[in-house]
Amino acid sequence: MFLANGANKPKHRFCGFTDAWKHAPLGNIANFSEWNWYNKKDLSDIGIPIILYSRLYTKYETLVNNVDATVDMKNNSVIPTGGEDVVPA
């Protein structure tokens, strides 16, 4: 993908991008957080909608549109506002 001489401009670019790539720690452009883990025993009939980790692999695909699991929120839980990227570790 990069030129043989080690240049920091890839051979193939999206239209409108011509500048060299800049190296920056990912933490400079994104926020990371860990949340309190929930599992099936924490589920309740009413409460806050959550995405269970295991369902990232079995129920959801690229976009999560409907969440069908709810829990009583634990202290210090991360509450998303919408539009976040979820990356399972």
Image (cartoon, rainbow, N blue to C red):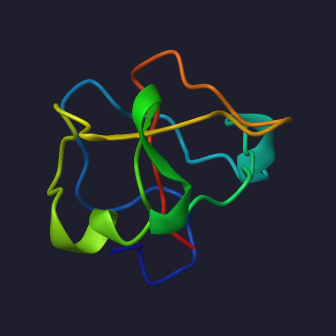
- Residue at horizontal 55%, vertical 44%? 20
Question: Looking at the image, which residue sits at the far right?
Answer: 76
**In the visual, does 34 lie left or right of 61?**
right
Left or right position of 6 against 59: right
Picture residue at 17% right of the left edge, 51% below the top: 62
Q: Residue furthest bottom?
A: 4
Residue furthest to the top in view is: 81
Q: Is residue 49 left or right of residue 42?
A: left
All told, the count of numbered labels is 0
Q: Position of residue 44 (x, y in %)?
A: 44, 42
Q: Quadrant of residue 89?
A: bottom right
Where does residue 43 sit, x and y in percent of width and height? Answer: 46, 51
In this view, the residue in front, 72 or 54, is 72
Give the residue displayed 29% in from the left and 65% down from the top. 55
The image shows residue 63 at horizontal and vertical percentages of 18, 42
The vertical placement of 57 against 42, above or below, is below
- Quadrant in which residue 27 is drawn: top right
Quarter of the figure with the N terminus? bottom left
Residue 59 sits above or below residue 30 on the image:
below
- Front residue of 66 and 28: 66
For residue 37, what is the image quadrant?
bottom right
Looking at the image, residue 24 lies above or below residue 88: above
**Picture coordinates of residue 18, whole percent (x, y):** 39, 34
Q: Residue at x 39, y 23 (%)?
A: 83
Say whether residue 68 is left or right of residue 24.
left
